Amino acid sequence: MKRVLHNSVILPVYLPSIIFAFSQSMLIPVMPLYVLSFDISYSIVGIVLACTGLGMLLSDVPAGMLIRRLGMKWTMVLGIVTVIFSTMALFWAHTIPEVIVYRLLTGFGMALYSVSRHTYMAENIILEGRGRAIALFGGINRIGRFAGPAVGGIIATAYGLRVPLLWVGFIEIVALMAVIFFVRTDKDTRPVGLPEASSGSSIFFTTLKAHYRVFATAGSGQLFAQMIRAGRGVIIPLYAAGIIGLDVQEIGLIISIAAAIDMLLFYPTGIIMDRYGRKFAIVPSFFLQAVGMCLVPFTESFTGLMAATMLIGFGNGLGSGVMMTLGADLAPEDSRGEFLGMWRLIGDSGFTGAPLLVGGIADLIGLSMSAWALSGAGMIAVFIFLFWVPETLKKRRR
């Protein structure tokens, strides 16, 4: 029987993940302002920021198929290399089309890394401990994201908005080395089930047909859930800078403080998911995020925005690893990579749609309405998970 926390998970997954999370979070307060520095509208800012999600969206399903061909290790390596190149290239970008191309490539790399990493965890963690192990994974990512925004903000304030882009690339080389040295390359790292010679497209369509009801219900809930999660990374910096008048260092500090609240909750969240059920963590998580997002337009100072952002962070902390755990519960063993590729495709649709929603509404009727729209997305997710999605832990136990 597989162990909940085995070295094959700790070293190749947790170690590079915390490094990767720290480096990418450095860009949270930087990227919206970096894109805005090209003197464009909020709508175009939203479109550019959505390109990362769009790249992930277009690559999630191919990533699931590629795992069967390359194996998990080399899919992870290819993904991280792509992210490093595309992020560092932004330092020399002079036009918005260049930025768009590089962010699409970043999304492609993130999809390869995320889907292969998710599949690796689903293969190596037993059901009874999956909630705790994946919540720990979510906590590790949150620990990585704790200091990242503040560090990114400090570097950007001291040296300009472009310098953090180089730092991100250099740090992610360390994560790449961890994957190369610690992920196994033997046959155990390939998904179980159908042989490699099977047609990737036929497996994908078979999986989609067999599980379309799951994708329609739980997948829809995940779509709206990821919208509010992704949207906070856009609305908080833009609202802080454009409405309250904070600088990038103050914005980074707000996000890091919220991340500190966020990261403290991963362990109790894992216990809740494994002892009481997945929905006991999912529903409160997105309800609190929706309430916090609704309060953002009422803030008028650093302290007020920090309080609202901390509430959002608290809610997100209760959701540490919940979507990954739910996806792993639902994934069939004979086509796990393809299922999780489709699962991430749906979630990344929400991730992609959030910046577009924020930018479009902000240009039409203001940033405040963008925050309320994101709050509405969170409440829709709560409704779907509460009434339409069965409890997967009890279902699997029966």
Image: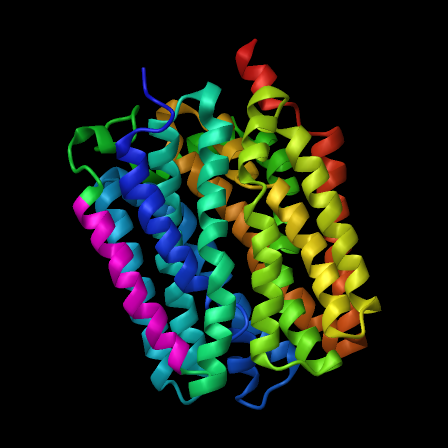
Give the vertical position of 340 relative to 297 (above or below): above
Q: Position of residue 19 (x, y in %)?
A: 35, 56
Which range of residues does the magenta coloring cover? Answer: 163-181
Q: Position of residue 221 (x, y in %)?
A: 66, 41
Give the vertical position of 365 relative to 289 (above or below): below
Relative horizontal placement of residue 196, taking residue 167 as reference (left or right): left
Q: Is residue 349 visible?
A: yes
In the displayed image of the protein, which residue is found farthest to the top?
398
Magenta stretch, main secondary structure class? helix
Relative horizontal placement of residue 13, taking residue 236 as reference (left or right): left
Residue 165, magenta (yes or no): yes
* Quarter occupied by the N terminus: top left
Give the vertical position of 362 relative to 1 (above or below): below
Q: Quadrant of residue 176?
A: bottom left
Relative horizontal placement of residue 163, taking residue 41 as reference (left or right): left
Relative horizontal placement of residue 124, taking residue 270 as reference (left or right): left
Q: Position of residue 306 (x, y in %)?
A: 70, 65
Q: Quadrant of residue 39?
A: bottom right
The residue lying toward the viewer, choosing from 9 and 227, is 9
In this picture the colour scheme is: rainbow
Identity of the residue drawn at 40% across and 76% down: 164
Residue 392, magenta (yes or no): no
Q: Position of residue 294 (x, y in %)?
A: 80, 58
